[in-house]
Amino acid sequence: MKEITVKDAIELCHGTLICGKQDTILDNYCRDTREIKPGDVFIGIKGENHNGSLFYEEALENGASVCLLQDVEISKNVVDKYADRAIILVEDTIKALQELAIYKRNMYDIPVIAITGSVGKTSTKDIVASVMSKKYNVLKTEGNYNSQLGVALTILRLRDHNAMVIEMGMSKLGEIHRLSEIARPTVAIITNVGTAHIEFLGSRENILRAKLEILDGLQNKGKVIINNDNDLLHEWYQKFNNKYNIYTYGMENESDIMPQDIVMSEDGSTYNVNINQKSYPIKVGVGGNHFILNSLCAITAGCVFDIPMEDIKEGIAHFELTKRRMQIEEYDNDITVINDCYNANYDSMQAAIHYLGMLKKKKNVAVLGDMLELGDYSEKLHRKVGEEVAKNNIDILITAGKEAKYIAEEAYKNGMNNEKIYTYDTKQEAEEKLQEIIKKGNLTVLLKASNSMKFQEIFEHLFKK
């Protein structure tokens, strides 16, 4: 394992050593004092409402060997008590972590796949990492750790890995530029350009600009993989296919990797794909067109790294989704729950509703909440979701939230029976109605909303095993 010491941290982060030894090794970074284990590095993150650095004594009591802190005063009593621990003061702990991550990344000459997009980043990361793991010891982003802090923490987990799959998120211009500088990808993947964060960026064209920042840190001779079915990415590809080494996948527009003979079912999809004039059968264990696209992306990545097709097939067939992203569970009384409540925008709502509408064996129930960060586009996009609900023959619709009422209004306008639509202001009211409905059984229930709507609580209250 390539190591970072306290001395390295002081030099890289322009820090001040309050106490401790300079040869102490920094390993296993943690920002939550409740999760600190002996020997960990505690990172005090300063947010809008509180400064995590203020809890450094609790971290030390729990065994932290190093504390990286900002905007705190360290008493002499603490220095005397924990003289064997290293306490480093820096101007900004997030920027300090990023500098450490750059240093760590530069220690490794390995493939690094960076993934961004308006929707599907996490599920694409999961399936690509599963394919890559057939050839490499892969470090991948945990959960949704795709922020300015999360990417740095992921890179700092590098040990004996020989490949990385990194997810990159953003809410404004410049953020992915910085993440790409830190991660220095050898392959960049853009899954799509939709409407997520349009409140802050103003247009899909600006969202495209933000996503393309992933190319800013791309290494020489690096490769780019794009979803060629996305309208803006397709236009970009047509303009710049001679400037970058671009590989395409898609189901509609002519692409390098395309499916044939698609068969979709409740349990997933199968299709054939032609590679080097040979046809291979592919099985995807999660339903919906969007997971076919995810698998095509994984095939493309596998081919870029010369992974045998039999291994690619196995990686796709056995990948595991991050929780709360199309997490499908079976329960008593013949109830299936699709827990997709980590986040929501129009594109992911459309995909989830389309998948729910495919399932015909049981009555299907869509429990939908507000999509946030849409600004002036909010009513329009919620109404478009309502159109999708009506179009996909959803049996029962329950909405929760001030914006989600537009989903219900538009579903009714587009022909859904008003007696099958239930509109509420709060999550609690929606949960009570769902509890009443599931008593009858024989249902498939979709839970989908932006994370701050806390639909996960509905799942935990009504369905958690």
Image (spheres, grey):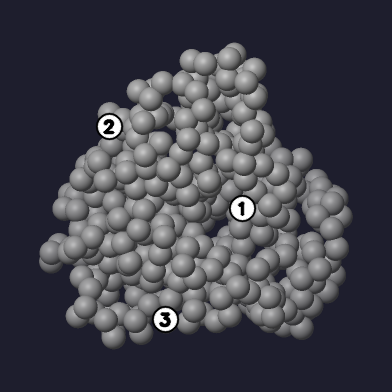
Give how far apart the Cα atoms at labels 1 and 2 are. 34 Å
What is the count of numbered marks? 3
x and y percentages locating residue 111 in the rendered image: 24, 49
Q: Which residue is mark 3?
A: 232
Between marks 1 and 3, how big is the CA–CA gap?
Answer: 26 Å
Point 84% across, 66% down: residue: 423
Going by the numbered disc 1, the residue's amino acid type is: Tyr
**Which residue is located at x 25 percent, y 41 percent?**
107
- The reply to whether residue 383 is visible in this rendering is no
Residue 35 can be seen in this image: yes
Question: Is residue 5 left or right of 55 when viewed as pictured?
Answer: left
User: Tag 1's secondary structure?
Assistant: loop
Q: Which residue is disc 1 drawn over? A: 342
The residue nearer to you, when weighing 69 against 206, is: 69
Q: Closer to the observer: label 1 or label 2?
A: 2
Give the x, y percent position of residue 47: 65, 48
Q: CA distance from mark 2 to mark 3?
A: 41 Å
Picture coordinates of residue 197, whole percent (x, y) = 58, 69
User: Helix, strand or loop at disc 3?
Assistant: helix
Numbered label attached to residue 2: 2
